[in-house]
Amino acid sequence: MPEPIVLYDIPSQGTAVKSWSPNTWKIRYALNIKGIPHKTVWVEYPDIEALMRKIGALPTGTNPDGSPQYTIPTIYDPNTKTVLADSALIVRYLDKTYPDTPRLIPAGTDALHAAFTQAFRSVLVEDLFPITVPATADHLPPRSEAYFRATREVLFGVPLQELSPPGPKREKHWAGLQKAFGTYAQWLQADGVDKPFFLGDKIGYADISIASYTVWIRVVLGEDSKEWMDFKTWDGGRWATYMDAFKQYEYVDVGEAAVP
C-alpha cells in the first residue's frame, strides 16, 4: 500500500465542506476516482508562497509585479519524493505514476483536453467569477479573507461586493452562466448522441473540470440557496444528474493545518 499523497488545499469556513477551490477539487476528484490514498494539509492564502518554496514547489505563473507566483493545488508524493503544482500537470503525473488506476487523460487526448480547458474557461469565467468570487471571500477564515479581498479587488478594479450585487447586474451574470452550461450541454451532444460524459460513459479530466467549478458554485452559494436550486433545473436537470455521478468521489478528509 503506497503512503498517502499530501494534497495542499485552501480551507473555507461556514460551508458544508471545507474544500471549495475548483482547481484543488480537480485533484481531489482525481485522487478519489483513482482510489489513491491521500491526506489534506490546509494552507491559508498568506502562507502559500512561503510553504510552497519550503517544500520545493515550482512557481506556476508570474505575478503582476513580475515576481514568481506560487499556487495551490500542489501535491507531495512521498512514494516518489515528487512535489508538483498545476492541476493538469498533477493529473498527468497521477495517470503516469499510477497506471493501474482509471486514466483521466487517455493516450492521444492531451491536445483535446488542453483545447477543452481553454474553450471551457473562455465561455465560463466572465459570468462565473462575479458571482463566486465575492461569495468565496465571505466564506474564508479572517487572514485568508483579507488577503483574498485585497488581491482580487486589485485584479477586478472594484470592491468585490460591486461585482454582482442583487438586481439586474447579478441576474445578467446568472443568465450568462446558464448560457455557458447550455453550451457545454451542446458539446456533449455534438455527434447527435446524448452522452453522460465527454469521453462517453467514463469520467475524464474534462468532466472533472466542469464538476470542480460546479462544486465551487454549490459550496460558496450553499445547497439551499435559490440560485443553486435554479442551477439544478438547467438543461432539463442534466447538471443535477451530472453531479450525482460525482457524489461518490467527493470525500474530504479532516486533514491538518499547515504550520507557517
Image: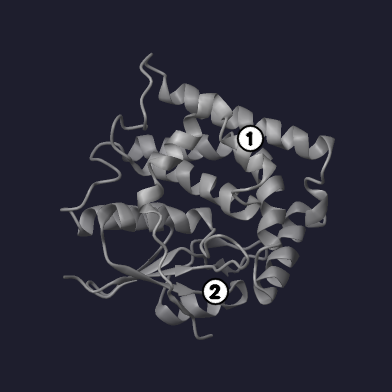
Q: Earlier in the sequence, mark 1 or mark 2?
A: 2
**Residue bearing mark 2:** 48
Amino acid at pointer 1: Asp
Residue in the image at 32% along x and 58% along y: 31
Task: Residue at 59% x, 31% y: name it.
Answer: 180
Name the amino acid, label 2.
Ile
* Residue nearer the viewer, 107 or 197: 197
Q: Is residue 36 left or right of residue 117?
A: left
**Position of residue 239 measured from the top left corner of the image (x, y, whole percent):** 49, 34
Q: Secondary structure at mark 2?
A: helix
Reply above or below: 152 against 42. Answer: above
**Number of marks present in the image shown:** 2
| Crowd around label 2: few <14 · some 14–19 · many ≥20 (10 Å) | many
Of the numbered discs in the image, which one, if any, rests on residue 86?
none
Closer-to-camera residue (185/89): 185
Where residue 210 sits: x, y (%)? 47, 41
**Residue at the spot of label 1:** 230
Residue 202: where, in percent of width, then height? Answer: 28, 37
Q: Point out residue 56 in the picture as x, y percentages from the top left corner.
A: 40, 77
Q: Residues within 10 Å of mark 1 (few under 14, many from 20)?
A: few
Q: Is residue 71 left or right of residue 137?
A: left
Residue depicted at x 16% and y 70%: 1
The residue sitting at 40% across, 48% down in the picture is: 247
Position of residue 84 relative to residue 122, above or below, is: below
Residue extending farthest top: 192
Disc 1/disc 2 C-alpha distance (Å): 35 Å
